[in-house]
């Protein structure tokens, strides 16, 4: 056989071997990754179903269309429509939905085998001046240790996906509660404006009457100045409440993701003179509130997932400590007179680093989380008891205003109106009675707001989220603000 034919046969043999090894590697990779699915629809559907069951609200993966948004804003917003619009149009929530795709891609990637490595070498013998022999070697290999631990790595990444799902559920529940509370605040501020306008009108009439008495010499200058000051303070209080109303609207604009022409929406309050605040509390919701709060709390579920995740990581580190690197492959060599092919095996010796430090750190982290989990459960139970007591107390206050305080002061105003008609009391006395009734109406609105907020926080608690300390302090701070703004009559 001529040297030319030998060279052709040798090149063909090398090409065939390379093609065969590459094809087998590609086929194995195709089989291993053929089931990869990057769709987040199924995971999102689970979150959407739970939200529908808990709150009767829809979720959507994607931005709300402008046509649908304009349609929802064309009518006055009630509580249900406001919350629904926030869930569909809040961009922060939509951004969180996309995190599902990121974590699901990581989960799929954790199960994909690493690419094999290919090494080629060519050697030429220059010892003979007349004949130059060439030898070539080709090695294809992959880390089999990584392949063996892929299932455990994918299980671990699955826990991260579950935790992301819990976190998004928590964000949905928080957005619902924040929107409900912001809507109740806006309606309360709307009623406060109406009552303060009545107070301003009453003080305006009283000031006009006092001006006439003062000019006629029937009222001292001190009494006239005091009435004028009360009138000025009433107008200042109205400006303050109007500013509160504007801030409440902007808070809702943020939660609903609105700007531009979309901010010209209107609300649908129950109407004047006074709304009837329903204070129905289901006894079965309060009897087992501690256990329900612990069972449904999402933060506790996330901590439990973290504990299980660390246990899986400890198991993975134990295996990796014994087999940190194990490589198998195929080696071929060809020269002028011989051709060789055979397996290649290589592995790291676990002499120094067997994952001792990582394992110790994970075990300490696990104990840390177990203690935190227990303490968090204690806090959930305590906050559940506090919220239960606050809700019952808020209900009693609202019922007391509706059944005792307001009817009693309405009767007082009716009697003083009769005395005024019979000229037994003067105009200022009658106006003072109307202002006192308006003061109790403001207190009633605040009591109703406190109850509605506590009811919203109860739903938030039973749906799996613990109201923040800031939310629980909100009602008390608003009460102080209203009393300060109406301190002079």
Image (tube, grey):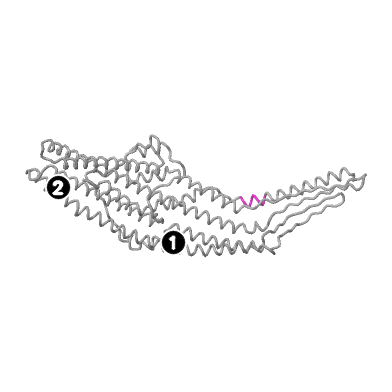
Task: Please give the residue where the numbered disc 2 appears in the rendered image.
Answer: 413
Viewer-nearest residue: 126 or 362: 362
Q: Residues within 10 Å of mark 1 (few under 14, many from 20)?
A: some
Query: How far apart in space, not on screen, are marks 1 and 2 (Cα)?
Result: 52 Å
Residue 2 among magenta residues? no
Viewer-nearest residue: 115 or 211: 211
Q: Residue 328 sits in which quadrant? A: bottom right
Residue 28: x and y, percent?
A: 66, 52
Residue 133: x and y, percent?
A: 87, 47
Residue 376: mark in rendering:
1
Count of numbered tags: 2
User: Horizontally, is 393 left or right of 430 in the view?
Assistant: right
Q: Residue 313 sits in which quadrant? A: bottom right
Secondary structure, mark 2, is: helix
Residue 121: x and y, percent?
A: 79, 48
Please report the bounds of the magenta region as a residue range: 27-33
User: Horizontally, is 148 left or right of 411 in the view?
Assistant: right
Secondary structure, mark 1, is: helix
Viewer-nearest residue: 402 or 337: 402
Q: Quadrant of the C terminus?
A: top left
Residue name at image x 16 percent, y 45 percent: 432
Residue 417: x and y, percent?
A: 11, 45
**Which is more foreground, mark 1 or mark 2?**
2
């Amino acid at each position: 056989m001529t040297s030319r034919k030998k060279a052709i046969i040798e090149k063909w043999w090398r090409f065939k071997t390379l093609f065969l090894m590459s094809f087998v590697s590609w086929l194995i990779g195709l089989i291993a990754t053929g089931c990869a699915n990057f769709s987040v629809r199924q995971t999102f559907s689970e979150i959407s179903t739970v939200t529908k069951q808990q709150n009767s609200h829809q979720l959507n993966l994607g931005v709300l269309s402008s046509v649908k948004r304009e349609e929802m804003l064309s009518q006055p917003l009630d509580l249900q429509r406001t919350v629904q619009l926030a869930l569909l149009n809040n961009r922060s929530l939509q951004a969180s939905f996309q995190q599902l795709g990121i974590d699901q891609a990581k989960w799929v990637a954790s199960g994909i085998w690493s690419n094999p490595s290919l090494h080629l070498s060519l050697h030429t013998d220059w010892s003979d001046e007349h004949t130059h022999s060439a030898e070539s070697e080709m090695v294809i290999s992959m880390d089999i240790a990584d392949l063996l631990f892929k299932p455990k790595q994918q299980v671990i990444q699955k826990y991260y996906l579950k935790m992301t799902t819990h976190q998004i559920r928590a964000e949905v529940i928080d957005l619902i509660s924040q929107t409900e509370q912001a809507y109740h605040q806006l309606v309360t501020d709307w009623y406060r404006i109406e009552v303060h306008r009545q107070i301003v009108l009453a003080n305006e009439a009283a000031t006009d009457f006092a001006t006439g008495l003062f000019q006629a010499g029937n009222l001292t200058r001190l009494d006239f100045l005091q009435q004028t000051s009360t009138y000025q303070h009433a107008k200042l209080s109205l400006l303050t409440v109007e500013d509160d109303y504007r801030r409440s609207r902007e808070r809702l604009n943020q939660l609903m993701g609105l700007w531009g022409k979309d901010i010209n929406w209107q609300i649908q309050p129950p109407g004047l003179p006074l709304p009837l605040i329903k204070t129905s509390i289901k006894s079965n919701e309060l009897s087992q509130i501690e256990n329900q709060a612990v069972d449904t709390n999402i933060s506790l579920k996330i901590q439990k997932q973290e504990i299980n995740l660390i246990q899986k990581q400890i198991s993975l580190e134990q295996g990796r400590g014994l087999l940190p690197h194990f490589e198998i492959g195929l080696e071929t060599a060809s020269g002028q007179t011989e051709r060789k092919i055979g397996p290649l095996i290589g592995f790291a010796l676990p002499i120094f680093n067997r994952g001792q430090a990582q394992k110790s750190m994970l075990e300490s982290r696990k104990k840390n989380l177990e203690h935190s989990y227990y303490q968090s459960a204690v806090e959930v139970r305590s906050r559940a008891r506090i919220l239960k007591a606050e809700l019952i107390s808020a209900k009693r206050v609202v019922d007391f205003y509706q059944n005792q305080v307001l009817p009693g002061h309405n009767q007082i105003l009716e009697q003083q109106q009769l005395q005024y008609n019979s000229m037994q009391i003067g105009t200022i006395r009658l106006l003072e009675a109307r202002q006192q009734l308006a003061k109790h109406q403001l207190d009633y609105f605040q009591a109703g707001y406190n109850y509605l907020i506590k009811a919203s926080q109860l739903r938030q608690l039973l749906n799996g989220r613990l109201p923040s300390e800031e939310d629980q302090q909100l009602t008390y701070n608003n009460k102080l603000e209203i009393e300060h703004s109406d301190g002079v009559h």
